[in-house]
Image (spheres, rainbow, N blue to C red):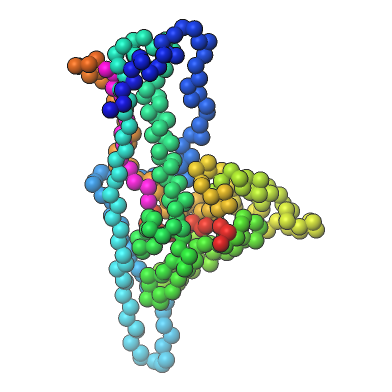
Amino acid sequence: MAVMASGGFSQLLSKDFEKIFFDNYRRHDKEWQRTAQVMSSDAAYHREGELIGLTSFQEMAGEGQPAPMEQFEQGPEKTVYFNEFKLAVQITQVMYEDDQTGYMKQAIQELGKAAAYTQDLKFWDLLNSGGTAGSITGINGEILFPSGGQPLQGFQGGTYDNVVDGSLSKTTLEAALDLFEGMVNENGVPVQMGPPYKLLIPYQLKWKAKELMLSAYDPESANNAVNTVHDEGITYEIVHYLTDSNTCFLVSQNDHDLRHIWRRNVSFKSWDDPNTGNALFKGDYRSQDTFYRWRGAVQISPA
């Protein structure tokens, strides 16, 4: 068990140091909260199912014909269980008393920073691992960005792709917008999805995103051609937790299903061990980051 004792922190016991640096850098504060669909649960699990509706009317060959019968279809279901996250620190009474810097009294603050970092890591892994076999699957049993397209669950069958092959450019962004414009439901019926859109990018694609979002003229042409994606209702956001410097994601801000589900929100406790006098600090929470429906998110990535 890790215990912070005076023997391991001699710098904090001395008054001779003008300053001791202690991770006082500014952090990117909870970037997941600007994108996630956040909800909470009061049970041990969260379950959702799907009901597939009707297709279209059929034209009759003549008078007096009976109406063809169609029915709703029960689709797949998915159950999510919650993970528990914890971290604690323990400080000896002597160390706590003799600390000349006050840093030991910042234990809960440090636990809070660790919790925030963990939440970003877990949420953005939905996108980072979205094209990896064996990663989180949606209600249809497929990963978020399968290479063969998403299977449609309705009567007609078929697939619909939500992946654009290629680096971020005007051409690939147009292709991603076309996927939203041509979006269909499980029966292949066209549905409306977006705008507004948000382009989620690693910091390495910031300059390309600026060209595409902020210029009224085509940044890839010397002929003053119109930038066709300039007024399509797209904003961009830098996400510092995306791990592939060449991959980005276009999401419909109102329709994507990238979720953070709270079962128990973050809480912190502190107490003194009655036997040793050690100061203990603990933080914990329960949550799950997941998706049920794939519609609303498109990946743009080199093949």
* Most distant residue in the top direction: 15
Q: Answer above or below: position of 13 versus 158.
A: above
In the rendered structure, the answer to whether residue 99 lies left or right of residue 216 reads left
Extent of the magenta region: 278-290
In the rendered structure, the answer to whether residue 282 lies left or right of residue 164 reads left
* Most distant residue in the bottom direction: 62
Residue, x 40% and y 40% (percent of image)?
Answer: 119
In the rendered structure, the answer to whether residue 89 lies left or right of residue 255 reads left
* Most distant residue in the left direction: 275
Q: How many marks?
A: 0
Is there any visible trace of residue 196 in the rendered image? no
Instruction: Identify the image quadrant of residue 52.
Output: bottom left
Residue, x 41% and y 10% (percent of image)?
Answer: 13
* Most distant residue in the front direction: 7
Asked whether 104 falls inside the magenta stretch, the response is no
Measuring from the top left, give residue 12's x and y in whole percent. 42, 13
Question: Magenta segment, principal secondary structure?
Answer: strand
Most foreground residue, 103 or 53: 103
Q: Answer above or below: position of 177 versus 201.
A: below
Most foreground residue, 188 or 16: 16
Most foreground residue, 14 or 211: 14
Residue, x 42% and y 35% (percent of image)?
Answer: 116
Residue, x 41% and y 77% (percent of image)?
Answer: 156
Is there any visible trace of residue 160 in the rendered image? yes
Q: Answer above or below: position of 122 versus 139.
A: above
Of the 4 image quadrants, the one containing the C terminus is bottom right
Of the 4 image quadrants, the one containing the N terminus is top left
Measuring from the top left, give residue 11's x and y in whole percent. 44, 14
Measuring from the top left, give residue 242's x and y in whole percent. 51, 46
Q: Answer above or below: position of 241 versus 52.
A: above
